[in-house]
Image (spheres, rainbow, N blue to C red):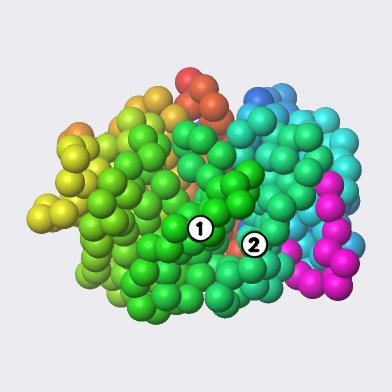
Amino acid sequence: MSDTRSASSITARMRPVATGGASVVGLHFLGDQAAFVLGEEAILLVAPDGSVKRAAIHSGAILCAASAGTRLATGGDDGKIVIADAQGSHIVAAADEKKRWIDQIALGPDNAIAWSAGKTAYVRTGKGETRTFDAVSSVGGLAFAPKGFRLAVAHYNGVSLWFPNAKSKPDILTWKGSHLGVTFSPDGKFLVTAMQEPMLHGWRLADAKNMRMSGYAARIRSMAWTFDGDYLATGGSDQLILWPFHGKDGPMGKEPTLLSPHAARLVTVACHPKQDVVAAGFADGMVLLVRIGDAAEILVKKPSLVPVTAMAFSGDGKTFAFGCEDGEAGMVDLG
């Protein structure tokens, strides 16, 4: 498909955000503030009026980030876990004793936070108590369950489901290979991982039934659930792939919905918080908003030959933001 699409365009409404040329490795909204996580040292907080505040929070590369409500958690190669708010105030929540890189991070209920360094996963409760779990290999992903206090720890040959407050051993979901990203469905009935190979693997948690989701051209580095949990949107192909999760069997025995084919690979996805709309960011820099029901497209950003690395919608769905590998970034008021 050519770069000139028949989609409606809102490119003229895009407000650029100056990052100083730093790669954008994460993007989250803290209330009405857009938090652009830069590859080195800092975050940029952009207010609705366009004012920008830079906060230096690490002394090196920022390797992972997660948000919930009005707090942003980041991990860096300085071995620190930092919590920042919408005003740019921040604290060092924890630091690795061996100064190992913080590879993964997740936020949970009651102000809990999880992170990993090497093979060890940590959970700090809202009361300040720390629990640890040693995985069989380097931790590839972390995710808190939507209900209860349970953490999924992805690693080689499967996922461990760990109750940090219990003394019992974690339940193990087994599937051969390296599991790198992990996510629970919003209803807590399914768990899905991104593999080192170009495929997803999932389990129905009620009976540990395996679900293999293939057909990708490259490793899936981005997954996002639609607001109602009916679909899991994914990158890793030359089109938007949406796996159906409505019904008790999820995608088992069903074909995915395929939308917005393009000449370049889809690398980053984000879902609107209130509508069946998915943002699709491609390796050539193009950004589309895609409506699932009728496959309608809105062009947000034209191709620029540099990959889109991060995208997010505000909690009310009225603002959309994106960032790219070369530091190009912008925001759009959706109304």
Q: For mark 2, what is the residue?
A: 133
Whole-angstrom CA distance, mark 1 to mark 2, is: 9 Å
Magenta stretch contains residue 101: yes
* Foreground residue among 110 and 167: 167
The stretch in magenta equals: 93-102
Give the mark nearer the N terminus: 1 vs 2. Answer: 2
Which residue is at a point 71% across and 53% down the rendered structure image? 131
Q: Quadrant of residue 186?
A: top left
Which residue is at a point 66% across and 31% down the rendered structure image? 110
Q: Is residue 42 left or right of residue 4?
A: right
The location of residue 291, given as percent across then percent down, is 28, 37
The location of residue 46, given as percent across then percent down, is 73, 35
Q: For mark 1, what is the residue?
A: 170
Q: Is residue 167 left or right of residue 277?
A: right
Can residue 238 be seen in the rendering of this structure? no
Which residue is at a point 77% across and 62% down the rendered structure image? 76
Which residue is at a point 56% across and 30% down the rendered structure image? 314
Q: Amino acid at mark 1?
A: Pro
Q: Quadrant of the N terminus?
A: bottom left
Please say if the residues under marks 1 and 2 sit with CB atoms less than 8 Å apart.
yes
Q: Residue furthest left?
A: 253
The location of residue 200, given as percent across then percent down, is 33, 65
* Foreground residue among 332 and 97: 97
